[in-house]
Amino acid sequence: MKNIITLSTFLLLFICTFTVNSFNVNSLSSEDLIPSCEEICLMVVDSFENEYGCLDAEDASELYQVLYGHYCR
Amino acid sequence: MKFLLKFLFVFYFILPNCFSQNTLVSVTYKLSKGNGGKQNVDKIDEASTKTNEVLSGVSKNLELVEFIMYCNEYSSIYFIIDKMQIAEDFTYKIASRLGGNGIYYKNIKKKIKINQKDALGEKLNILYDYDEYEWKITQETKMISGYKCFKAVSTIEEYDYLKKSKIILKPEVWFTPEIPVPFGPKGFDGLPGLILEATNNGKTFIYASKIQFNPENINEILTEPKGGNDIAKDDYLKILAEKINE
């Protein structure tokens, strides 16, 4: 009986570890590390604001639209 | 008697003309950037490449961008000076937005303040609050183009749908009561004198490079922009946000 419990626990631990590792590997895949075009546009807006000062809500949204239209369409 | 007639002539005909001449003005504005905030974009990835492309292009084009404002004592119109040869350059378009986008028109008699622009695939008239800024006039002065200017500051709080947070801006302008028109560039207005320098954030400045009194054809230019669909600024920002989140 003890052996069965030990074996079951071992198997359960093995399955859990395997599942978690698989998940980590998937979450760190190269595709997920590359930002999307939308994210890149947001980064450019951030850099632009760092260089030229904080934009008002209207200007920031319009700048994003211009960048998105140029780079992502 | 002759002296009296001369005095009356000057009083009734010349002085009023001098006054009205002073209130018909065109001002050319240019853009400049303050120091600081240089980006470290030495990395070679897609975001950095695009950031470099935008920042270096805007920096190159910034000094080429010029705007003009025509105004009298009760209305003003402000727009970019068309430069056909570079107008289609992507980074020139971005640089020009630092000085405004489209046509800004304000009329004190009609109590309207609009920004007409091509946006969301159509021509829109963005309706701004007529009294958009609550200015605090300071004692600080400086001379700009031979005019004594006073500094005025304001605070604007608004929700930024792109950043999904509230932002606070502290516009700062320099105006001269020596030219008594309550207008300025990019919708900065509402002060007892022409605005000759303005910034929304202390880093990018719009400054007057040329002031001309009684410019030609001002009455034809100084008219309300025609066409376009009216939309309140808040509604416009919400629609922009929806487009961004699509």
Image: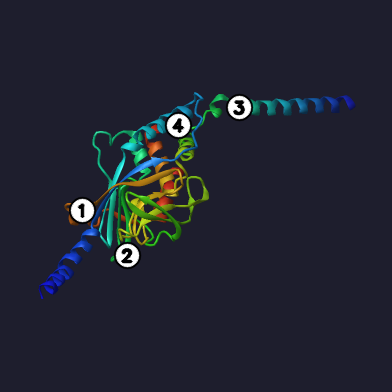
User: Is any atom of residue B58 visible in this view?
Assistant: yes
Q: Which residue is mark 1?
A: B221
CA gap, disc 3 to disc 2?
57 Å
Provide the secondary structure element on which disc 4 rests: helix
- Name the front one of labels 3 and 1: 1
Q: Which residue is mark 4?
A: B51
CA gap, disc 4 to disc 2?
41 Å
CA gap, disc 4 to disc 3?
25 Å
The mark found on residue A28 in the picture is 3
- The extreme right residue here reads A2
- The extreme bottom residue here reads B1
User: Is tag 4's residue or tag 2's residue first in the polypeptide sequence?
Assistant: 4
Q: Which residue is mark 2?
A: B111
Q: Which x, y percent locates residue B162?
A: 48, 45
Q: Amino acid at mark 4?
A: Thr
Provide the secondary structure element on which disc 2 rests: loop
Viewer-closest of A29 and B240: B240
- Name the front one of labels 3 and 2: 2
- At horizontal 16% and vertical 65% (from top left) the residue drawn is B14
